[in-house]
């Protein structure tokens, strides 16, 4: 289990949102390329990259900066936000993105995403963006008819790598991880899990150790890093035994 630091892109800047709301963005870095290099220099195993503009339907604003980030670091990148057809996915893989996180498209076009995972085995994560038991779509603005159980029924026996679970109500709130949500969902599948939403400090990392299973691949660190409440090296050292 590893720490995956996050860069959320909006207007080519590194920002953080509160509960995923588009109008709550705070800029934490004017230069996401330098931020990505910093994470690599600190020994982080993978970068979590989100194109917020694309998630809200504003395509191509951050395309060039994503390519520059990919060229500037050597560690793997997992990317989400606005991946709503296979053509977009292909383009990201062509520029060297290692893993894609697919949300709305995975809910609305199941067979197409299953086919995409056939072409890119073990490189696709399905996003579990949850409010309670409901999977949210369209930049977290709309409810889908899916629960996480329905997602598992459709994707567990495919070549997807696993799931990225986010507790939307906790995201950007520094309120602590939702361990009940994590534990209840991870028991329903044998796939890998990355978790996020609400990570506050080193106590959350200790809490993850208590519920650890080999399925837990990583935890996303966003605002906790940027406001200084979590030291990435300390957290990664604590989790290193579970690498």
Image (spheres, rainbow, N blue to C red):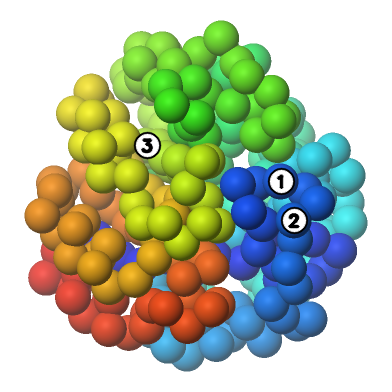
Instruction: Give left or right: position of 107 versus 202.
Output: right
Residue 130: x %, y % from top left: 48, 31
Q: State which mark lies toward you, 3 or 1.
A: 1
Q: Residues within 10 Å of mark 2 (few under 14, many from 20)?
A: few
Determine the residue positioned at 71% across, 30% down: 141
Quarter of the image that includes the N terminus:
bottom left
Q: Give how far apart the Cα atoms at labels 3 and 2 are.
A: 29 Å
Mark 2 highlights which residue? Answer: 24
- The quadrant in which residue 16 appears is bottom right
Mark 1 highlights which residue? Answer: 21
- The reply to whether dot 1 and dot 2 touch (C-beta < 8 Å) is yes
Q: State which mark lies toward you, 3 or 2.
A: 2
Q: Earlier in the sequence, mark 3 or mark 1?
A: 1
Residue 116: x %, y % from top left: 57, 28
Closer to the camera, 141 or 106? 141
Closer to the camera, 20 or 105? 20
- The quadrant in which residue 12 appears is bottom right
Determine the residue positioned at 65% across, 27% down: 137
Mark 3 highlights which residue? Answer: 162
Determine the residue positioned at 21% across, 56% down: 208
């Amino acid at each position: 289990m590893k720490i995956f630091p996050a860069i959320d892109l909006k207007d080519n800047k590194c920002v953080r949102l509160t509960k995923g709301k588009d109008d709550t963005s705070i800029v934490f870095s004017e230069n996401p390329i330098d931020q990505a290099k910093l994470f690599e220099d600190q020994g982080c195993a993978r970068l979590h990259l989100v194109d917020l503009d694309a998630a809200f339907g504003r395509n191509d604003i951050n395309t060039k900066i994503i390519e520059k980030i990919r060229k500037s670091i050597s560690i793997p990148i997992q990317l989400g936000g606005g991946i709503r057809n296979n053509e977009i996915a292909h383009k990201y893989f062509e520029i060297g993105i290692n893993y894609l996180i697919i949300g709305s498209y995975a809910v609305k076009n199941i067979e197409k995403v299953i086919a995409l995972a056939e072409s890119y085995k073990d490189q696709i994560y399905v996003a579990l963006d949850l409010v309670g038991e409901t999977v949210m779509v369209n930049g977290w603005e709309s409810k889908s008819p899916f629960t996480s159980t329905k997602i598992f029924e459709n994707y567990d026996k495919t070549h997807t790598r696993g799931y990225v679970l986010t507790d939307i109500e906790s995201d950007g709130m520094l309120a602590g991880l939702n361990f009940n949500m994590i534990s209840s969902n991870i028991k329903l599948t044998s796939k890998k899990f990355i978790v996020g939403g609400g990570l506050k400090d080193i106590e959350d990392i200790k809490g993850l150790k208590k519920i650890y299973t080999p399925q837990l691949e990583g935890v996303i660190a966003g605002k906790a890093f940027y406001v200084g409440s979590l030291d990435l090296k300390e957290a990664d050292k604590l989790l290193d035994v579970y690498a």
